[in-house]
Amino acid sequence: MAALSNLKQCPPFSTLPDLALRHNHIPELERYPQINLNSELLTNPAGQRFYGGQSFVSVNEGVLKRITRTFFDGGFWESLEEARSPKSREQAPLIAQAGDLIARVLGLATGLRLRILPHTQQLCAERIAQFVETRDWLNSDVRYLAWNRHFFSLAVAGVDDVVRIYTKSSSAATATVLKSPSQTQITCMAWRPLCAAEIVIGCRQGLCFWEVDNTLHLGRTNAPIKIFKHPNNLPITSLQWNKDGTQLATASIGDRSIIIWQPDNGRMQPLKRLGPPGSLLKWSPDNDWLFAATVDRVFRVWNCHQQWTTDRWVCGPGGHVQTACWSPCGRFLLFVSSAEPILYRLQFVQQSLLSSSADEKEILPIADLNACSIDANRTLIGGPAQQLAWDPHGNYLVVTFKSTNCIAVFRTFIQKYDLQISAAYYLSGETAAEHPSFICFQSLYKDNDRSVLTIAWSSGRIQYYAFD
């Protein structure tokens, strides 16, 4: 197995003053937008956290009208809290007492349900943070990154519930802004394939579909072109488009079903199986398989062409699949459990006509991610993995970690029936305390044939690193 102890140091990209000496200097990267979301959050009025109620002027409403409005804005539980609020208690004591009674009954029922089904606990922000791929999601300035598949367009979701769209000519002042009261606690997003300007954002309220307009700057009123809510009014914690953009798969850590949406006609198909709720989805590049992790040890791989049949696996005790990624060819799936620092491989290629299905899909460990020291200062790298990213050429695998701050880079060699991996080097931030919050690779398209790693650091800055 490959091991982190063989990693070599790569000079930090941003600390070398002479461009010619930078290990990965490419003139094209100088034209990429310089983004520091922390600075934008501090200096821009939109940097404050934005929630639906902040955009409305307070008016005097009756208790029933206020409860009804809260129900449609935030759902049943928010309206129940409004019924029990001090203001409602003062104006309508009987309604508040009825709210207290309902809350006690539901509390008893919830307690009984949690004893039987512990995975159905309330989906607070802290629980969501346990299962998303972004490190320190609750406090990270950058919560998600997404590159457009066909053009130079980078979407950056911030802790302020605002998505900023950057192009090569963008700056902090001219970035397109997607901001709505119906879009809070963003967990995931993706540009629609074969579509120039449509992006979908997964959040607490469900799915927000946007048609990106370059004139949508801060201060202008705008809204998603459509919003899809989860059937059970649950937050969306993972989403993936299929290859041609006709189907969108979503998962919620409060629901056992994976939902397949057809956004053009508004139809949906739940993929139901017994077991814990879903947490993470990864659609294979060849459109054949849909990987679905859960909040427990169980994970599944759905066959998209055989009436959604599924194979079921179980990872190590005490954990769940934290992160996963497909090879660009779609023949190999790599994943890491939250309970053990081991990188596993799942193969989806038939080696011979006589191979059984069990042989074709054997899970094998291929890299040891246990923490080790990498320099004279005893700087650690490794431990439980946070996120995996495989470059679109299939030559490099990048790994970030939950508790150590350096980024590990492995070289990968994909053959028809085999995958080989070896340790390459590690990347570090500008300071020892700076850690990567989220990583992704820029998509390949007509004007870009290079693998460019995009790193959102905990300081709020975004860095680009080009691979050979």
Image (cartoon, grey):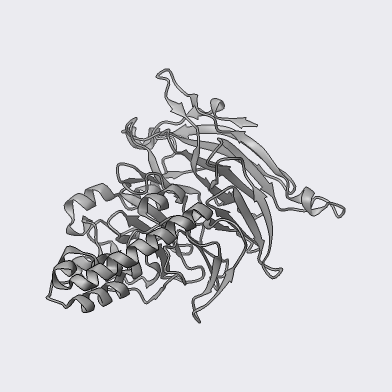
Q: Is residue 397 above or below residue 174?
A: above
Residue 152 position, x and y percent, is 41, 60
At 50% from the left and 82% from the top, the residue drawn is: 265
In the rendered view, does 214 fall on the left or right side of 332? Answer: left
Which quadrant of the view contains residue 199? bottom left
In the rendered view, does 101 fall on the left or right side of 366? Answer: left
Residue 467 position, x and y percent, is 50, 43
Q: How many tags in the picture?
A: 0
Could you say which is closer to the camera, residue 206 or residue 364?
Answer: 206
At 36% from the left and 70% from the top, the residue drawn is: 212
Could you say which is closer to the camera, residue 348 or residue 413?
Answer: 348
Which residue is outermost to the right? 354
At 65% from the left and 42% from the top, the residue drawn is: 413
Q: Is residue 225 above or below residue 43?
A: below
In the rendered view, does 34 fall on the left or right side of 344? Answer: left
At 47% from the left and 24% from the top, the residue drawn is: 374
